[in-house]
Image (cartoon, rainbow, N blue to C red):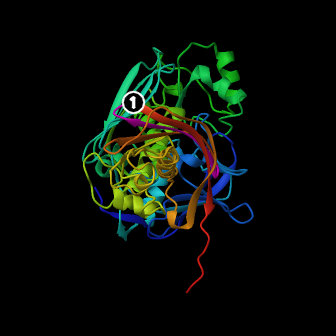
């Protein structure tokens, strides 16, 4: 696998019609700097707005993956993205003067050809691989979709498709060396649909640019000649049209591989997983994937990536069973002695859950006055410890030096038992709701598995005031 990031050497362009919108456009690939990522740029709109190619900007997944920002859209991005990641390109700008990339022949090969023509340029920064070190799973029981990512030291993908349709049956495929296998064995595999879907898709306002030159239509039912002609007219097909054998492409169009539909599903998934925003070291196993499931799985993996990135930013030394040690906490939180009331974080799930630990010592400063001869940790400080753990839960990758977390409200606070020297407090914070800069969390504190305190807390994130220079 490549170690350094790379982009293309020079701009290259291609033009054509979009599959679903039927609109003409020109698309130009341009080199981009290190750590830029993949971005589409709508040059036909004032200001040339950019849309980052990540799951946060997916706005639609109906028979294709549409990216958007505000009212600006780019439809059917998956084949373009598959070509880019299949060629191990990290940084690139895609200028497009329309709403949908040219479909070409329905595969990723036309994009691969122009990108190879542009040539590749290695960059100084290393690739930021996401190494999957534990199983990541997504299931949709209703659709029979199951996708997992398993630990491995390189990138692999295995795909199984089963449409419960005897015309196609079950197929599977796999890619085990992206650099060697993508171009010759997967890039030219074309999009496909069943004959019975054609009218439904057209009535749904899709495949306006579809033809037998840019898609495979698989015969899954018998039609009389006049009905077949009517379907052809709906597609704008002027040529003669006939059905071959059941399960064969219309007009006996030759498949490029016996399992070309399964290979194209792998191609689609490769493009959709580009929306994670980082190359993977993982083995992806997918049963019955589709754009909606691919995007949901990509969201799960991207969240894991963002979480790992945050941990790496603050925790400089790996420690068994610890996410953030006290040194990392002091890089994140503004609190210092004697008001730092968390010793370590042992669990952190981005925007979901955070678990902190505080070992309560007899040397705590507050025991001098609360109470002499009968030391009890003040309940307000237990809530403060939960609040500080909640501050960790609000981490999102932005610079904590520029922000403060201020609590706006504490509701339904209850104290169940005393906390005394020698106890170990475990704070469990769960995100209830988060909107922009305001969030609601539920906090619980335990000692030896027994609940000692609980409360609901509301917090806001504000800019840290600038201190005057001395």
- Height in image: 361 above or below 95? above
Viewer-proximal residue among 172 and 58 = 58
At x 48%, y 26%, the residue is 252
Q: Is residue 184 above or below residue 330?
A: above
Crowd band around label 1 with a 10 angstrom C-alpha radius: few (<14), some (14–19), many (20+): few
Query: Who's the residue at 45% across and 60% down the image?
Result: 332
- Where's residue 36, x and y in %? 49, 64
Indicate the quadrant containing the C terminus: top left, top right, bottom left or bottom right: bottom right
- Would you name the residue on which mark 1 appears? 450
Q: Which residues are magenta?
A: 436-450
Under circle 1, the secondary element is strand
Judge whether residue 276 is colored magenta. no
Report the residue that reaches farthest toward the front: 373
- At 35% from the left edge and 28% from the top edge, which residue is drawn? 172
Image quadrant in which you'd find residue 448: top left
177 left or right of 356 in image: left
The quarter in which the N terminus is drawn is: bottom left
Q: State the image coordinates of residue 261 (x, y, percent, origin top left).
A: 44, 31
Q: Is residue 312 left or right of residue 142?
A: left
Is residue 327 positioned above or below 220 on the image? below
**What's the magenta bit mostly, secondary-structure-wise?**
strand
The x and y percentages for residue 452 are 45, 34
């Amino acid at each position: 696998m490549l170690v350094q990031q790379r982009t293309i050497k020079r701009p290259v362009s291609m033009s054509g019609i979009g599959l679903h919108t039927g609109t003409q456009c020109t698309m130009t690939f341009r080199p981009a700097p290190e750590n830029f990522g993949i971005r589409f740029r709508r040059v036909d709109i004032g200001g040339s707005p950019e849309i980052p190619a990540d799951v946060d900007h997916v706005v639609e997944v109906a028979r294709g993956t549409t990216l958007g920002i505000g009212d600006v859209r780019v439809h059917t991005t998956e084949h373009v993205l598959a070509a880019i990641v299949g060629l191990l390109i990290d940084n690139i700008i895609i200028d497009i003067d329309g709403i949908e990339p040219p479909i070409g022949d329905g595969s990723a090969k036309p994009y691969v050809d122009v990108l190879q023509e542009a040539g590749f340029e290695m960059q100084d920064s290393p690739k930021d691989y996401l190494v999957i070190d534990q199983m990541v799973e997504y299931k949709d029981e209703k659709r029979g979709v199951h996708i997992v990512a398993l630990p491995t030291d390189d990138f692999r993908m295995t795909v199984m498709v089963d449409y419960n349709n005897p015309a196609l049956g079950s197929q599977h495929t796999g890619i085990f060396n992206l650099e060697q296998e993508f171009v010759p064995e997967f890039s030219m595999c074309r999009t496909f649909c069943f004959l019975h879907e054609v009218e439904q898709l057209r009535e749904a306002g899709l495949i306006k640019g579809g033809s037998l030159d840019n898609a495979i239509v698989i015969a899954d039912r018998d039609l009389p000649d006049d009905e077949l002609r009517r379907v052809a007219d709906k597609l704008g097909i002027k040529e003669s049209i006939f059905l071959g054998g059941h399960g064969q492409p219309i007009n006996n169009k030759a498949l490029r591989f016996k399992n070309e539909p399964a290979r194209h599903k792998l191609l689609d998934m490769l493009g959709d997983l580009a929306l994670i925003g980082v190359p993977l070291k993982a083995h992806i196993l997918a049963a019955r994937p589709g754009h909606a499931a691919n995007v949901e799985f990509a969201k799960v993996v991207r969240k894991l990536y963002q979480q790992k990135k945050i941990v790496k930013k603050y925790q400089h030394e790996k420690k068994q069973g610890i996410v953030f040690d006290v040194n990392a906490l002091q890089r994140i939180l503004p609190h210092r002695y004697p008001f730092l009331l968390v010793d370590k974080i042992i669990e952190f799930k981005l925007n979901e859950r955070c678990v902190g630990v505080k070992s309560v010592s007899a040397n705590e400063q507050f025991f001098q006055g609360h109470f002499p001869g009968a030391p009890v940790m003040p309940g307000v400080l237990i809530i403060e410890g939960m609040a500080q753990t909640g501050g960790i839960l609000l981490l999102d990758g932005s610079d904590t030096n520029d922000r403060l977390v201020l609590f706006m409200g504490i509701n339904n606070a209850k104290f169940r038992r005393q906390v005394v020297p020698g106890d170990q407090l475990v704070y469990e914070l769960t995100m209830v709701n988060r909107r922009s800069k305001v969030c609601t969390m539920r906090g619980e504190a335990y000692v030896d598995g027994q609940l000692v305190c609980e409360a609901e807390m509301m917090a806001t994130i504000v800019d840290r005031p600038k201190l005057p220079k001395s």
